[in-house]
Amino acid sequence: MISRNDICWCGSGQKWKKCHYPQLPSTEPLAKRYLKEFGILIKTQEQIEKIRKACQITSEILEQICAAAKEGVTTEELDLLSRKLHKEYGVIPAPLGYGQPPYPKTICTSLNEVICHGIPDKRPLQKGDILNIDASCIVDGFYGDSSRMVAIGEISKEKQLVIDVSLECLMKAIEVCRPGGEVWEIGQAIEDYATSKGCSVVNQFVGHGVGIAFHEAPEVPHHYNRLQIPFVPGMTFTIEPMINAGVREGIIDPKDGWTVRTKDGKPSAQWEHTILITESGHEVLTRF
Ligand code: MF3
Ligand code: CO
């Protein structure tokens, strides 16, 4: 068996590693091209390890906050639990102080007709509520991002529908994530399915590259679009479809600058995962 420091078989006189040593399919020129063409950061194996860890912890923290979301509990209490968990794990909540105006809490809690970016407050959860909890953690400088729905007691058919359809949309979108696919296929999978169930897809907010920063390129629309960006191994991004029972339009609360509510007041639901594109397809980094 020839080893890396042996003289190459070809007669060049050079070491094998400097000569005909088989190169792993080098991602480096590709990474340069993706950065230049799309602004996308293709992650190295070392970065992927760190992002995987960040996503695992995000998932564990989110799981525990969701388990605490019960009738009578306020979303502010969920935020306090989130702060405690982030401290215990020694990680930083990415939303706190993020954006303009600075986001005031460590998680987003989006209730019923709130599409996204709901701010934890003093309202106790009630039977019939549906709640999205969105957690994003910074672990050793790397980011994970995930969200889930929780139902409080019995909920209406319409609320159950948006919960089920948004989860199915996320799963169908994950299925198209593989080398050879392109970013537009995510929006196609989601809008095809959501509209077949009589629901609408929010187009004012999108998924995003994530890992080295909170929000990186590319944008990942959940609605029909023409983004011809081929998936390549080492891409990490979120898919986070927001699905409404009524119209797709959302309105940002002018008082807090964050809370987004459906224009018609009908319910909305969302699930979010961070995804890694691999040689063979994808890995769901925030799997629950
Ligand atoms: N997953 C959400 C997003 O990517 C998390 C928002 S946190 C906030 O937009 F701070 F921006 F609200
Ligand atoms: Co996100």
Image: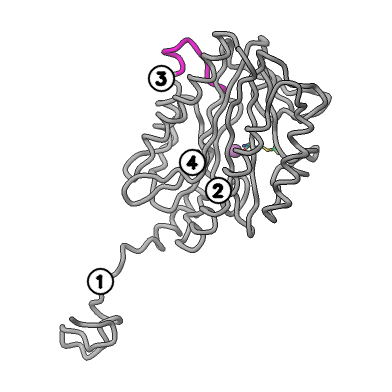
For marks 1 and 3, give the CA distance: 44 Å
Q: Earlier in the sequence, mark 4 or mark 2?
A: 2
For marks 4 and 2, give the CA distance: 9 Å
Mark 2: give few (<14), some (14-19) or many (20+) Cα within 10 Å.
Answer: many
For marks 4 and 1, give the CA distance: 35 Å
Numbered disc total: 4
Which residue carries the number 4 mark? 287
Callout 3 amino acid: Asp
Q: Quadrant of residue 96?
A: top right
Which residue carries the number 2 mark? 55
Residue 22 is labelled as: 1
Q: Is residue 195 above or below residue 232?
A: above
Residue ID at (75%, 37%): 79
Residue ID at (41%, 19%): 193
* Residue 160 percent coordinates (x, y): 54, 14
Q: Is residue 15 left or right of residue 114?
A: left
Callout 2 amino acid: Cys
Q: Quadrant of residue 172?
A: top left
Quadrant of the image containing the N terminus: bottom left
